[in-house]
């Protein structure tokens, strides 16, 4: 697997956590080892192609196999880096939050898909996804955020950028009416309740759904339908 060399910001460790010098150094070591292996794989692949052009099939095959093994080593280093920085950045995350700092695009996609599926299986209502603002990306273009947005669209989930532009709010209920205001991580799901037919607002956001019928209204409606049915039969 080849991961695009695109990650959130200039630092892999979320700066909002403070410190992180040792964490950043270990992360850089693992990513550096992966880059070295990728360079080695490219060199072996080029040698394999040259051997094939010379008509030396045996050498070409041997070099190709070596390139594959080195590619696996590169993937392993990248996997270690991804897991390592994910644990560091999410050690103190809220239960409804996931931090993607330090992840390459494909890594972030895998993490978000798995997390969404897990949360939906738990009947969770939402998820806050830290995608970064792209301040340190090439031309300040966000790469992680569009990838997460695509995943949400594929899964039919509503989402919005929060007041903190480096974070997204993803609704896991299937409701497409997003609130104007998303709650902070750990504050729960801000969806209005209906009491006596009046909408209760939470946090400034509004979800729209029809008011629930009272038990008395349901009984009256059922009686009317039964009466109509009897009249039709007669």
Image (cartoon, rainbow, N blue to C red):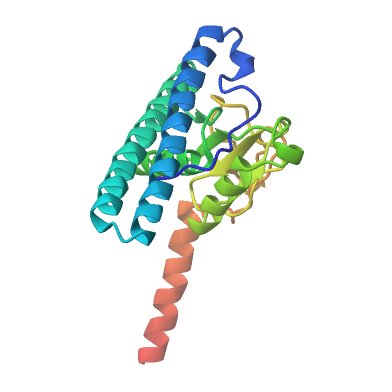
- Whether residue 18 is visible: yes
- Residue extending farthest right: 139
- Whether residue 191 is visible: no
Which x, y percent locates residue 25? Answer: 52, 13
> In the picture, residue 205 is in which quadrant?
top right
Residue 114 or 68: which is nearer the viewer? 68
In this picture, residue 199 sits left or right of residue 212: right
Residue 187 versus residue 88 in the image, above or below: below
Which x, y percent locates residue 77? Answer: 38, 28
Residue in the image at 76% along x and 40% along y: 139
Residue 188 versus residue 122 in the image, above or below: above
- Residue extending farthest front: 54
- Residue extending farthest bottom: 234
| Quadrant containing the N terminus in the rendered view | top left
Residue 165 or 68: which is nearer the viewer? 68
In this picture, residue 193 sits left or right of residue 226: right
Which x, y percent locates residue 207? Answer: 63, 48
Residue in the image at 47% along x and 36% along y: 39
> In the picture, residue 118 is in which quadrant?
top left
In this picture, residue 61 sits left or right of residue 92: left
């Amino acid at each position: 697997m080849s991961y695009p060399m695109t990650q959130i910001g200039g630092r892999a460790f979320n700066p909002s956590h403070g410190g992180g010098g040792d964490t950043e150094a270990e992360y850089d070591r693992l990513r550096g080892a992966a880059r070295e292996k990728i360079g080695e794989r490219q060199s072996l692949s080029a040698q394999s192609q040259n051997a094939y052009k010379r008509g030396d099939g045996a050498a070409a095959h041997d070099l190709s196999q070596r390139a594959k093994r080195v590619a696996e080593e590169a993937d392993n280093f990248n996997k270690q880096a991804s897991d390592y920085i994910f644990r560091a950045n999410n050690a103190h995350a809220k239960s409804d939050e996931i931090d993607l700092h330090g992840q390459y695009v494909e890594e972030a996609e895998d993490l978000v898909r798995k997390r969404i599926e897990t949360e939906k299986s738990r009947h969770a209502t939402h998820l806050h996804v830290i995608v970064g603002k792209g301040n340190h990306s090439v031309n300040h273009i966000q790469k992680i955020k569009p990838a997460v947005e695509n995943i949400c669209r594929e899964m039919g989930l509503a989402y919005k950028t929060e007041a903190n532009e480096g974070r997204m709010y993803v609704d896991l209920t299937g409701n497409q009416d997003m609130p104007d205001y998303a709650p902070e991580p750990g504050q729960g799901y801000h969806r209005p309740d209906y009491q006596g037919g009046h909408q209760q607002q939470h946090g400034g956001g509004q979800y729209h759904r029809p008011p629930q019928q009272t038990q008395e209204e349901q009984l009256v409606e059922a009686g009317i339908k039964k009466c109509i049915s009897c009249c039709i039969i007669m």
